[in-house]
Image (spheres, grey):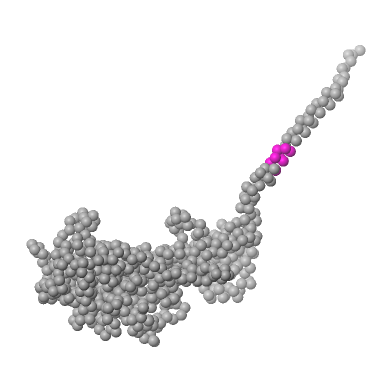
Amino acid sequence: MGQRKRVAIRNHSAEANLFARRTFIAFFGVLVMLLLLFSNIFDLEVTSYEKYQTRSNKNRIKVLPVEPNRGLIYDRNGVLLAENRPIYSLEMIPEDVKNLEQTVKELGELLEISAEKQANFLKNIKRKRRFKPAELHPRLSDHQVALFSVNQHKFPGVFIDARLKRYYPFADLTTHTLGYVARINQRDEIKLAEQGLKDNYAATHNIGKLGLEKYYEQQLHGKVGHQEVEINNQGRIVRTLAYTPPESGKDLTLTLDIELQMIAKRALSTKRGAIVALDPRDGSILAMYSNPSYDGNLFVHGISSKNYKKLLENRQLPLVNRTLQGYPPASTVKPFIALLGLEEKVITPDTRIWDPGWYQLENVEKKYRDWKKWGHGWVDLTKSMEQSCNVYYYDLAKKLGITKISNMMEKFGFGDYTGVDLHEESRGIMPSTQWKRARYNQPWYGGETLSIGIGQSYWTATPLQLSQALSVMVNKGNIKVPHLLKSISEKVMDEAGENLVSVNTDVIYDEKPPIELKQRKNWDLVLDGMHNTVQKLGATAHNAFKGAQYDAAGKTGSAQVANIKQDEKYDAKTTQESKRDNAMFVAFAPYEKPEIVIAVAIENVAIGGGATNAAPVARQVMDQYFGKRVITSHDKSRHPHHDKQYRVKPLKKAG
């Protein structure tokens, strides 16, 4: 018989205990997990509720900036010089268009959109979200707007969007003064960030780049608004929750008179040069024109490289603002030199010198010539200004010396900023021994002092500086800061808090310390000489103002641009144009109580000097100011950018 097999007997009690232990462990694990879950829920719903609610709102609510309207700019008589005009762009929402390529092609045929622009649109659209509008054509003409409006039903998902852009109705007439706005670039963004203004420009595309648009950027820009919108997980706007409207920029009223500006342009015609006219009673600039100019509207929408290159390569240099550029002031500064001579008692009104047509320093071979080859004979102070005698001022400058001349001329503002509200101003040069040593590391020579006496050598002054210096002269030492801004207007709520009303605030400018003379009669002696220059028969500016209905005074000047050798004779006809003399002129009127001072600079004139070229230009501006019609009723000016015709008409006498 075989052996019996053993049969294992199960221990039910042990198994039951094992099962119980495992069940307890599993239950404990589940309990721990539940406690952790409820603890996390408590933290999310109670402890960190505000934190996650804020993060949730940030994902659900988006704040969109709203661009403010830029402030407008007016001339002193309320004529609009810078406005905001609506422009129309063709927009498309790709997801609402069934056949994108076919739609773009049909729109191109309808609105004459170039194939290149169509191809660029189809290329760029791939990088954008399909539910957001994309721009197909940035600037629609009125004809294109009308044509699309009639056919819009054929193009679902395509629409016209309108927004405001800067526009200058008078185009090149005001560019050098107003400047222009253009698209914000990286440099602008860095500067705005440094000034803490970046958030205020969140919705703004353009910024002032030049002139008053740049100088008063913060006043013109306004304050950004905000729109709170609810968005879904795809970034779509579901609804608007709140809206904070933007604050429009402030409107500016300038001291400029656009009609005087028109006359200035017409008087200069094809000549390169500049005119500055201001009111000496308060320093307000009435006209400020540089010729030739250019249309600032070209830069607003982004000037093409072709057009910009054309401006840069233009030999007439239209981009240069000649009103703020330095010129040798020539004989226009002789009244200031004469005033210094009287103050220092180097001369008296009766002091006379003999003018043989040249002046020579001791032990120096070179002869310094007078503009009149045979000279003026015996010359006193009055005759020296009437005839603009160089020899008289060579001698006077030698006796005064460069240090006294430089110190006195600096008091009149030469060689320094005038304080005008434009960033582009040049300081000009008022030379001195220290200046030459610092600039050229050379000593000052006596012959250079002679040239300074007639406004030549290193001396340069802007037309604005000349007009300011003459303003100080006619004010007998009182200095008014030249300025373009007259008043600022902004919208505020009325007392009832229901309507916006416009509040106009005049700008008050501080005066600088006056120039005090030892003898105040010296002012009158010099001003009398300028009066004779215009009013006396045979004086240099008499012919230009013959028959004027107002009592004017002034001083002519002809600035030598190129050096002429001792044995050479200047002949404008045979001289290269860029080396011909500049014509200069300064004037004021009426003589007793001046209301207007003018400085004129004309470059490289072919015939004559300041009396022949610059003085008649000043005469035209003064005729307009004092009410004499210089443009007949049938002679109207129309610029291609104007919507309506403007006719220059006589002005009422200021004051």
User: Which of 532 and 160 lies nearest the eye of the viewer?
Assistant: 532
Residue 420's x, y, as percent? Answer: 35, 66
Residue 647's x, y, as percent? Answer: 40, 82
Q: Quadrant of residue 444?
A: bottom left
- State yes or no: residue 36 in magenta: yes
Q: Is residue 140 left or right of residue 583?
A: right
Q: Is residue 187 left or right of residue 437?
A: right
- Quarter containing the N terminus: top right
Q: Is residue 151 visible?
A: yes
What is the residue that sits farthest to the top in this orientation? 1
- State yes or no: residue 429 in magenta: no
What is the residue that sits farthest to the left in this orientation? 363
User: Which of 61 and 273 lies nearest the eye of the viewer?
Assistant: 61
Residue 399's x, y, as percent? Answer: 14, 65
- The residue at 34%/71% (across/down) is 282
- Quarter containing the C terminus: bottom left
Q: Quadrant of residue 23?
A: top right
- Identify whether 61 is placed above or below 27: below
Across the whole image, how many numbered discs are drawn on residues? 0
Q: Magenta region, mostly helix, strand or loop?
A: helix
- The residue at 61%/72% (across/down) is 152
- The residue at 10%/73% (across/down) is 354
Q: Is residue 580 visible?
A: no
Residue 332's x, y, as percent? Answer: 23, 71
- The residue at 72%/37% (across/down) is 35
Q: Quadrant of residue 628?
A: bottom left
Q: Is residue 166 left or right of residue 416?
A: right
What is the residue that sits farthest to the right in this orientation? 1
Q: Is residue 37 left or right of residue 497?
A: right
Tell me where the magenta segment starts and ends, as one range.
Answer: 34-41
